Structures are given as C-alpha cells and as structure tokens.
Image (tube, helix red, strand yellow):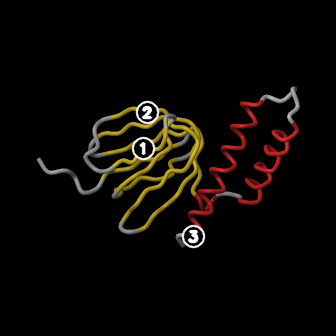
Amino acid sequence: MALPEKIHLEIVTPEKHLFSGDVDSVTVPANTGYLGILPGHAPLLAELGIGEIEYKMDGQVEYLFCSWGFLEVLPDRVVLLAQTAESGSDIDVKRAEEAKARAEKILESKSVDIDFDRVQLALMRAIARLNAAKHRASHR
C-alpha cells in the first residue's frame, strides 16, 4: 500500500476554524517538544504546548501561533484542537512586544511576590507570537 502524498490538516480553536486543507507536512509544538508529521505518519495523540505551527503546502510555508490543546495524528489527517491559535499575519506585533517586555521586567525584578510560572508562560507565549509573525513576514 502506497503512502499518501498529502495529509489533511484541520486547525480549530473554541472560537473559530482556522484552517482546513491538504498539506505536504506539519510541524507542531507538542508538550514534549516539536513533532514533524508527514503523510502516512503513525497514529498519535499528544498534548500541544506553546509555540509555532508550521505547515507546507505546494511550496509555500505558513506559520501560526498556538498554545495548549490536543493533537490527533492519523496516517491521512492531523487535527489540532488548540486553546489559542493565530495566523502569523493576524498577530499584533506591538502588543506581543509589549507583553514580552512586561514579562521580562517582572522576571528581572526578582520579587518574591510574583507567580513565576505564570509570568514565564506569558513570556513564552509572547515570544512564540513574535516568532510566528516574524517567520510569516520573512516568507512573504
């Protein structure tokens, strides 16, 4: 049995359906690290982390930011159920830069009253948003 040439990708959040289409490959931020997925991949369930989704389709590369959720991989399709996801072109870069600066300032203060984990996650989200926007802009 031949492997499929494309894999169907669905990206969904509670608010909207971001993408549906056949792609050449997908890279996603799983909670344990990035996963590269090609057509014919073995079935897999994983928890999404914070980072960039990258998918390739007909020579074009698209980038999205995502944080938390679940990933289902079957040989012919990938379904991403993300708590939050945004296309790189939809990201408000100024807002993400401000969020990054706020988080860095709080972490640098070394105050004992801060929720370190919460601020660290905010910093990770801001950096991932900026990376998705930057990658999207550099591939235009």
Task: Check disc 2 and give the amino acid type.
Answer: Ala
What secondary structure is found at the residue carrying circle 2?
strand
Q: In the image, is 118 to the left or to the right of 60?
A: right
Q: Are marks 2 and 1 in contact (CB under 8 Å)?
A: yes
| Mark 1 surroundings within 10 Å by alpha-carbon count, few (fewer than 14), some (14 through 19), many (20 or more) | some
Task: Check disc 1 and give the amino acid type.
Answer: Leu
| Mark 3 surroundings within 10 Å by alpha-carbon count, few (fewer than 14), some (14 through 19), many (20 or more) | few
Q: x, y (%) of residue 38?
A: 32, 50
> Nearer the N terminus, badge 3 or badge 2?
2
Task: Check disc 3 and give the amino acid type.
Answer: Ser
Is residue 14 or residue 73 the one in the foreground?
A: 73
> Nearer the N terminus, badge 1 or badge 3?
1
The residue tagged 3 is 138
Above/below status of 33 relative to 62: above
Dot label at residue 46: 2
In this rendering, the count of numbered labels is: 3
Q: x, y (%) of residue 5?
A: 24, 57
- Spot the residue most to the bottom: 140
The residue tagged 1 is 35
